[in-house]
Amino acid sequence: MAPPSIVLYDAPNATPESWAPNMWRVRFILNYKRLPYRTVWVEFHDVERALRSINAPPTATGRDGRPVYTLPALVDPSRSPSNPVILCNPNMIAEYLEVTYPARPVYPPGSRALQSIFVQYLMDVVLQPLLPIMVPLTYSRLPAHVRQHFRGGPSIPSGPHRAQAWEAARVRFDQFAAMLEKNNAGDGDGVVAMGRELSYADFVLVSVLMWINRVSPDDGWIQVCQWSGGRWARLWERCTPYMNVL
Amino acid sequence: MAPPSIVLYDAPNATPESWAPNMWRVRFILNYKRLPYRTVWVEFHDVERALRSINAPPTATGRDGRPVYTLPALVDPSRSPSNPVILCNPNMIAEYLEVTYPARPVYPPGSRALQSIFVQYLMDVVLQPLLPIMVPLTYSRLPAHVRQHFRGGPSIPSGPHRAQAWEAARVRFDQFAAMLEKNNAGDGDGVVAMGRELSYADFVLVSVLMWINRVSPDDGWIQVCQWSGGRWARLWERCTPYMNVL
């Protein structure tokens, strides 16, 4: 009998398909490390119930003092089927997978801190202009019966406001590409964040690209492929072997 | 006759001593690579005249369209005394020194892009709360005859405002330390940014520490040495062999 495999808890959109960047971050690592796993789909309004039922830890405490449960969740029974490892923070999941399954590493030696700062800069600075367009688009793509559990939030920018939103995002992505190009003089391949091999930073970044691809396939995604001299399209292409959903 | 050595243009404070983080960033690299150099001191109000006189390039264009000249400037006549290399942007100087003098490298292989993002995150996020206290303190320490060339700017926070300013800076430095501690589980030494050897990121960070040490020796510096479990004091200690002013 095959050993019980890793389980990834993910939330589908209306298609249904995997779209959320935090879930893809974990999925890319699992695929890159060639670890067998299966997906359990949990709709957003059902996350707390599902995670409490498997004794998953909360990831934060809300302003009202209540625990907050978020996806992704990873359950790994490989080492101890009766007492599986259960983790819910994507950075902690990445660290756990790297330590537990060190083959095909995602952190080049000595680079964890700089990889962490890369992710923080991406979140705090680079992605900020993307949110006013991507958050409402994401909401609109959730299944109708999930949407009704959440307030609508801001509406999708339209007409010139929509074009301006994508343009603001492009400017920030171009600035980020200029930083990544510091590697070009012999210290990189013009695609990945460190040297010539994919690493955690790339999987975090391509997970954002996946989010745009899934949520705005006919508009944002077509533009993003043209941004920054095609750098993001090249990263996407490089990561296609790791886009399976098991 | 010894070959002509590298010249670093720097601006003194009233003591006089070298205090500015952008100048120290270059100085640390020169010292770390054990490159002989000498310092030419230029007071702030005299920077444009001094740099134009050696045909140094401007580093930016002002809102009025005029070229902007800034320190540090590095002149390297080693390869061609009659046509020396002249650079004024600290990142470009670092890159030049690394390529021209590759012994004792400051960029681990494949890391230039992530090092660049480290610096950008430091500038855009980590250091922001430091500016309301450090900028007026810096101004107050310029020589009186230099200060008169510039507007005074904001005054030095006093009493509880001063304590609040340092506390706001401490919170951000602690958050940054938590990111750097990602290396602690076997991927670093708890002192440097990458692995176990000093690199460009460390020299940029310790140059900020030097700025605080020089500008607020009896107040800010004493506090900073206690912040983040002593992490910044350990980095300072580690870098003391490279604090010469030649």
Image (cartoon, coloured by chain):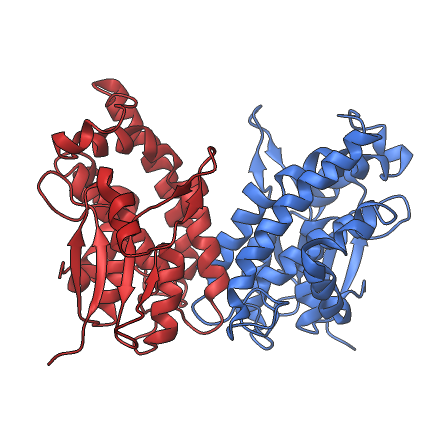
Chain colours: A red, B blue
- Residue B46 appears left or right of A161: right
Q: Residue at x 18, y 43 (%)?
A: A213
Q: Residue at x 17, y 33 (%)?
A: A146
Is A92 or B15 nearer to us in this picture?
Answer: A92
Q: Quadrant of residue A68?
A: top left
Q: Residue A132, image x and y in percent?
A: 32, 28
Q: Residue A230, image x and y in percent?
A: 24, 49
* Residue B5 seen by the camera: no
- Residue B197 appears left or right of A238: right
Is B98 or B175 nearer to us in this picture?
Answer: B175
Q: Residue B130, image x and y in percent?
A: 69, 40
Q: Quadrant of residue B142?
A: top right
Q: Quadrant of the C terminus of chain B?
A: bottom right
Q: Residue at x 74, y 48 (%)?
A: B20
Q: Is residue B239 above or below residue A44?
A: below
Q: Is residue A207 above or below residue A196?
A: above
